Every structure is written in C-alpha cells, then in structure tokens.
Image (cartoon, rainbow, N blue to C red):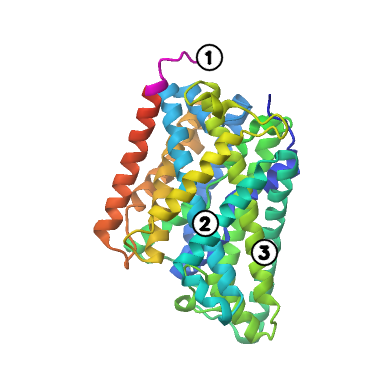
Amino acid sequence: MPLQRELGLRDLTLFAIACIVGTRWIASAAHAGPGSILLFFLAAVFFAVPLAIAVAALTVRHPKAGGLYVWTRGDFGPWQGFLAFWVYWIGIAFWFPSAAMFYMSIAAAALGPAYAHLAGSRVWLIAASLAGIWIALGTNLIGVKIGKWTENLGGMATFALGLLLLAVAWVVYSKRGVASPLNPLPAFNWQTLQVFSVISFAMSGSEAAGLMAGEVRQPEKTVAPAVLAATSFASTFYIACTIALLVVLKQTSISELHGVADVGLAAGQFLHASWLPPVIAAFVLMNAVGAFGGWGSAVSRLPYAAGVDHLLPAVFSRVHPRWHTPYASILVLGAAASLLLILVQIGDTLKAAINAMVSLMVIAGYIPYVYIFASAWKAGKRGAAIAGELATFVTLACSFVPEPDSKVWLFEFKIVMGTAAVIAAAWLLYRRNKSVQLP
C-alpha cells in the first residue's frame, strides 16, 4: 500500500514552519540576554539557510520518502544511511518529552498564580506530557490528508503569536521604553557556547520537509520554495520575538522554562489586558500540536524507509490500509519518547533534566547533518556544504558545555554514555540485518 501525495506548497510551507519554529527557544534566548540576537543571525546564515539549500537540492535528487536516510545511503552506503537515520530518530525521541514538558509548563504558568505550582511539579508535567505526546501521535495515525491541518494550524498560530508579541512589545515600549539593554554582542564565556548550541538546534528542522517527499505533490518543484520560505520566517520570528521579550521584561526576570508566560503575565498586568496570557498560552499550545504532528509524521518515514530496505523488521514497512500511514513507526516513536521522558528525570533537577535532554537532542540530532552537508557537497552545493559543516561541528562541541546549576559529572556522563549507546544500538541493529541485499 503506497503513501499518498497529499501535501501542496502551502501545506508543506506551514508544515516546515511548525517543525522549525519552537516557542520554547525564544524564552531560552531572551533569558541568555540580547547577545542571543546575534547568535540567531549567525545560526541562520551559517546553518539554517545552507540546510534549506541542501534539503532542496537533495530532494530533487531523491524525491521519495525517507529523506536523510535515502540521501546518505545513496551517497555513502547502507551502514552510513542506517546510522544517520538511527541517531536522528533517537534525537527526535528525546525532543518529544522535553518539548512536551516545556509546553505543559508554560500553559500552567500562563494561567496565573492559581495554577503556577503545576509548572514546577514533576508528576503533573510528566503525566501531562505523556498525554500530549500520545494524543498528538494518535491523531497523526489517521493520515496526512487530515493530519496536515494540524501542522497548518500550528504554522498559522506561530505567525499569530509572533505578531501578538511584537504588538505587545511595541505598546509597552511606547509607554515606558525598553526593560533590558539591547546590546547585540554576546559575552564570550562557556554559557554563550551552550546557548549557541541550543539556538542552532532551534534553527534546524527544514529537513523534515525532505522526509515527507514521498507525500508531497511534485516534490522537485515544491520543497525548495517551501523550506526557503519557512527558514526565512523562522529566522525573522526568533530574532523579533527575542527582542520583544527583552523589551517587556528584564533579562533576569525571564524564566528559561516559561519566559513567554512571564512576559504575557507582566504585559497583561501593565496593559490591564487580562485576556493576554491565556491567548498566548493558546497560541503556544497550538504551535506545540503542530510540531508534534509534524515531527510525528516526518520522523516515522525514516523507519518506514529502512523497513522497506529490510534493515528493520517488516512491520515498519507496512502502511495502514485505510489511513496510508506507517503506523508501527509512529507507535514505536511514542513508546520510546515516553520511556526517555521518565528515565532522564533520575538524579537531577527539573531544569537540568530538560537541559540534559536538549544536549542529547542536539548531539544525536546533529550527527546526521554531517552527512546531509556532505551529500550537499556531492550535489554541487559547495558553499552551503562548507558553511553547514562548520556550524554543525561548532554546535556539537558546544553541546558538551553543561548548565551552571547541573552536576557536571552527571551531565557529561549522560551525554557521553547516551551518545555511545545510541551509536552502539545502531551498529547492533544494522549487523543483525546487513546480510539482506539492498535494492
């Protein structure tokens, strides 16, 4: 049963926006200070734009489901393709729990003091995050034709949130000026390196459009304008919204976990607009739903493609007869994300646990970009390949810098052992199935 080509240019553009833009990252950036503005610009120029160019070129060469797995396998062989797929899939499995915890936390914080205690409750956050993950993945099972409206809603809500934050910041500025000095030069210290890895990860995601190439109408003509438009929007959104948060609140008053809610509450009180925090929370949650749906759809195509090549059990290559979705891949992703959500909490603070997941996401998620940009070099996109590889290696190095309030030995142990375990698991799975001849 083949996958169905249901995505047009508008759908794919909003799909890519939902996958690239995460409202969680503007809180992290504003918390780090105005120097994040320059870091976003550098990440856009040296990573996000080259990535969009690479994805567009590689989709023209391989216009079918599987994206980076298909690209890497074609250029560097089956083991390299399998490794790229596996570590990327694991990176997204870590992204799901950390993103869900953030979105549930900001929703509780934005509702006011009566619910603010829930934002710091591990039990509530874990339970709500598990519910959010499984609701999003469950609805994604019903197919791209219906599921694409989830990503459309997420993309449009992101656009509306950006306009709202800019409007609020402008009104606050006109009444009292800027709350934080807007010095765009970042401090040169270990924290800036850690922030840069997070910001670079925030700018990633356009490759998700390439993963869906098997369900895009005329992917050779559709993917390029979609990813370039989404990347341009994401760069503008991140920079503008980071400035907006710093206009409304002092840097030291912006929480890294729920800073968007902090700004909504502060601006609502200052402007006597009690409706503002719930509206911001609603837009944030719609962005989350779009992201969960988008990544659930995109990443499930990786095990599907590997299953078609007999590098995973045959069940992964099966498409649901009614919904035309790789249902086994979606269910396994949900199970892995749920397990990781619980395990990563052991022995650390809530904030440090989320930061550990972010670093694991960056490391596992960024290894495949080494392959993507190497394939871009082979496709003739030499400038994009050089810039992208440079940004990738810098980001990987920065990911090993721990947060000040985390236990350094525990943080580094989780990162090193987690990465080693991911690669070892890939090798064991590949060795088990490598005797099968690939097409």
Residue 373 vs 135, above or below: the answer is above
Among numbered discs 1 and 3, the one appearing first in the sequence: 3
Q: Is residue 181 left or right of residue 360?
A: right
Give left or right: position of 87 versus 63: left
Mark 2 secondary-structure assignment: helix
Q: Is residue 12 left or right of residue 328?
A: right
Residue identifier under label 2: 99
Residue at 29 percent across and 45 percent down: it is 417
To which quarter of the image does residue 49 belong? top right
Q: Are marks 2 and 1 in contact (CB under 8 Å)?
A: no
The residue that disc 3 covers is 283
Q: Over which residues does the magenta segment extend?
A: 432-439
Disc 3 residue type (three-letter): Phe
Which amino acid does the dot numbered 1 rest on?
Pro
Q: Report if residue 33 is visible in the image.
A: no
Q: Residues within 10 Å of mark 3 (few under 14, many from 20)?
A: many
Instruction: Kindly identify the amino acid type of the residue bearing the numbered disc 2.
Output: Ala
123 vs 108, nearest the viewer = 123
| First reached walking from the N terminus: tag 3 or tag 2 | 2
- The chief SS type of the magenta part is loop
* Left or right of 329 in this view: 399: left
Q: Which residue does the numbered mark 1 point to in the structure image? A: 439
Residue 429 is situated, as x and y percent measured from the top left of the image, at 39, 28
Image height check: is 168 above or below 285?
Answer: below
Q: CA distance from mark 3 to mark 2?
A: 15 Å
| Residue 425 screen position, x and y as percent | 36, 34
Q: Residue 218 falls in which quadrant of the image?
A: top right
- Between marks 1 and 3, how big is the CA–CA gap? 45 Å
